[in-house]
Image (cartoon, rainbow, N blue to C red):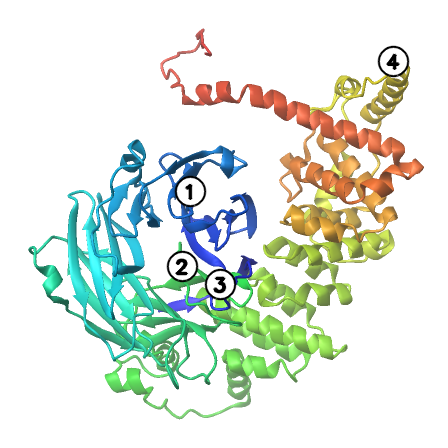
Amino acid sequence: MAALYEGYTLCGLVPSRSQSLSGIQGIEIERDNDHVIVTDSTRSVTLYKVSDQKPLGSWTVKQGQSLTCPAVYNSESKEYVAVTDKKVIRIWKDEDMLLDKTFKATVSSDIWRLHCGCGMEPVVLFQNGAVRLLDALLTAPQQTIEDVFTPEETIRWSTNIVAETQQFVIFTTEQKGDHFVYLQRLNLNDLQRYRLEREEPGLSPLSFSACCKDQHVYLLCLYPNGNLYQSVIPVRSQGSDEATHALPRNLLLKLPVNEGFLEAASVKILDEAHIAVVGVPHPSAGAGKDFLCIWNTNFQTLQAGKEMAGKIYGQLWSYSNKFFIPHGKTLSVIPYECTKSSLASALGKLSQAKTEGSKAPASIPSWNTILHGEVTPPPIAIQTRETRTQRKSQSAARLTLDQILELTKSASVEEVQKAVDGFLSRAYIQDLQSSVGQLASSIVSRSLDESSFYPAGTLAQLVRTQCLFHSGCPNLVLLALEKKDYFLCQLCLQFFQDIPEAVTCTCLRAFIGMSDTEAKQANLDEGSISFMESLTSLEPDQADLQNGFSVTTVEDSMDQNSAADSDRKTSQVDDNSKSLCFQKPVCPVGIHKAALLNEILMTAYSDSFLLPHLKDLSSQHVILFLQYLQFLYLRYSQDAVPQDLGFRSPTLPQIMDWVCLLLDSHFTVLVMSPEVKDLLIRLKSYVQSQVKLYSELGKIESSLKELDKMKTNKDAGLYSIEIIELF
């Protein structure tokens, strides 16, 4: 079986000059399955962390230059490789900021694509069909590149395949309506060439996908008429005359196209029995709708489908059980799962047979039972009042998803709660992933329309399944704020990883603006309340503060512009710091309100998107929030570190990041406010102390790494003296 789960947005699409292009050249996996490199159609390469939907780095070429193929990541050298203006190879690392100052080499022939398999050396495919390993090419960049085919032949698609220790490059070409397939084996420098059979006149392949199994390359070819063909290419060369023979093929699937032909579609091999296609209509949907579908090729059945809103560009990438699909104005990530299927499960009859078979005496099901749902009627029993009541409750617990969705439109809160409880208790994880979003959206939509309907417990239960995302139900957090259901807001902030920065700031304004009395009435998570109770009850040590902050560091951090001014400021901050060190910091807000603010601090965000929304906060709210952040910093800097208490709590880097964000977004207003002058001086000293601490840690980083590499002597005995030399 296969399932498509709730998707989320990774990034927006850069507008392209051509309406038929998405603005993305390619997506490649980086150091692990949670990092991808997105190359746009203009000048930028961006590294994203998929789980956080957060850009970690971006590199742009100069105006007038252009990226002509997707960038790849060399895991061996930990370097990025890209090509600009077809002939210039650029190589850089994470710490490099400007591409113009990194390594570059100009080659003698136009490059079509870079390919890099996991743990393999990058491969360069030239537009004339020649293939070179990157290191061998860079030893002599101006070396002569031979022509594999004539200039009239053009490459249309290419990929690389890694099978055990061998690396292959496979690419297709077109010449005057004929299409050819080339298989280049790098280890032995062996090239095989085949000719594809022609389809209907005027139809060219839309998409290719390839994989390797049992010393054979399996190539899929999708045509605009919906025909999906499979060809098998032997890895070992069968002779020198392959180019004179057509590559055998068989019709794997006949996909629906409705009226006309497919314009933009893509196919991807997932495993031995499953393929994914995007841009192809759903068999039961109307015309004009594009879907992402997973098909079982063994049983010719559709396993999962999801409608894609907006324009489809015929692009599809898959890494680590996640689809990356550009559509409309966004690049979406859609998790999926494929498991082994039997014929019964592929036809959707397995669960039905199990459910109905449990009512009847144990027997071996026949094919008619599996395929047509025919079961032996249960024996007639005498109905009593107790059995009728039990049967009614069981039937309510066995409602289908469609029945529950219909029920949410008119039933009472209690009935909806009971139906959802029954569904969640019996549903599998793949069912939850695809259905929780529909249930939440239906309930939220009705709650917005009817003020008297609000099943708070049901919504909290759906969020707790961890199968719901903000993008799947974007109005849920706003509804919780409207109903002042701060417990649900807290759950959403904890479990949703894709909350937009605008919604985060909306929650912040609501939390910081509420009174402590109102916050105290909220039924919040007990762990967050216990953390704040422990934090406010800790007794400070009569000693210097930790985490880089002390009286001496504050004194050292002050400006030395003039002797008199320096003495005055040092004395002022010295007195303030000593008083803060030896007095218990007072939390400026109640513990319930503080617990909600902590959830804001732990929410994922992007600086560039968050800063514009932070400017909407009032100056009073900013000052109050900064005072609370100061309280947290002082408590975290004492000997009793609150993270050791075992509660979910913000980290010190998160606190300092928010201090910097608030200062950046309201710098002018804060500087012009006399009442916050002392607060700003203290916050400045905190930031400087942290910078100094990390600077000192950076100096001994290499030494610590060498210590970690050293092998400890296991036969040290009860007492020993060991000399460690650091170079």
The nearer-to-camera label among 3 and 2 is: 3
Looking at the image, is mark 3 or mark 4 earlier in the sequence? Answer: 3
The nearer-to-camera label among 2 and 1 is: 2
In which quarter of the view is residue 727 placed?
Answer: top left
The residue singled out by tag 3 in the image is 22
Looking at the image, is mark 1 or mark 3 earlier in the sequence? Answer: 3
| Image quadrant where one finds the N terminus | bottom left
Looking at the image, is mark 4 or mark 1 earlier in the sequence? Answer: 1
SS type, badge 2: strand
- Determine contact: label 3, label 2, CB under 8 Å: no
Task: Say which mark, if any, is on residue 563.
Answer: 4
Which residue shows up at 68% across the image and 28% down it?
Answer: 690
In the rendered image, the vertical position of residue 672 relative to residue 219, given as above or below: above
- As measured in the structure, the alpha-carbon distance from the residue carrying label 4 to the one carrying label 1 is 52 Å
Which residue shows up at 30% across the image and 35% down it?
Answer: 135
SS type, badge 4: helix
- As measured in the structure, the alpha-carbon distance from the residue carrying label 1 to the one carrying label 3 is 25 Å
User: Is 187 positioned to the left or the right of 271 in the image?
Assistant: left
- As measured in the structure, the alpha-carbon distance from the residue carrying label 2 to the one carrying label 1 is 17 Å
SS type, badge 1: loop
Work out whether residue 155 or residue 468 is closer to the camera in this orientation and state it: 155
Callout 1 environment at 10 Å: few (<14), some (14 to 19), or many (20+)?
A: some
Which residue shows up at 32% across the image and 35% down it?
Answer: 138
Across and down, in percent, residue 725 comes to 45, 9
The residue singled out by tag 2 in the image is 317
The residue singled out by tag 1 in the image is 31
User: Is 59 positioned to the left or the right of 369 in the image?
Assistant: right
Residue kind at label 3, given as amino acid type: Ser
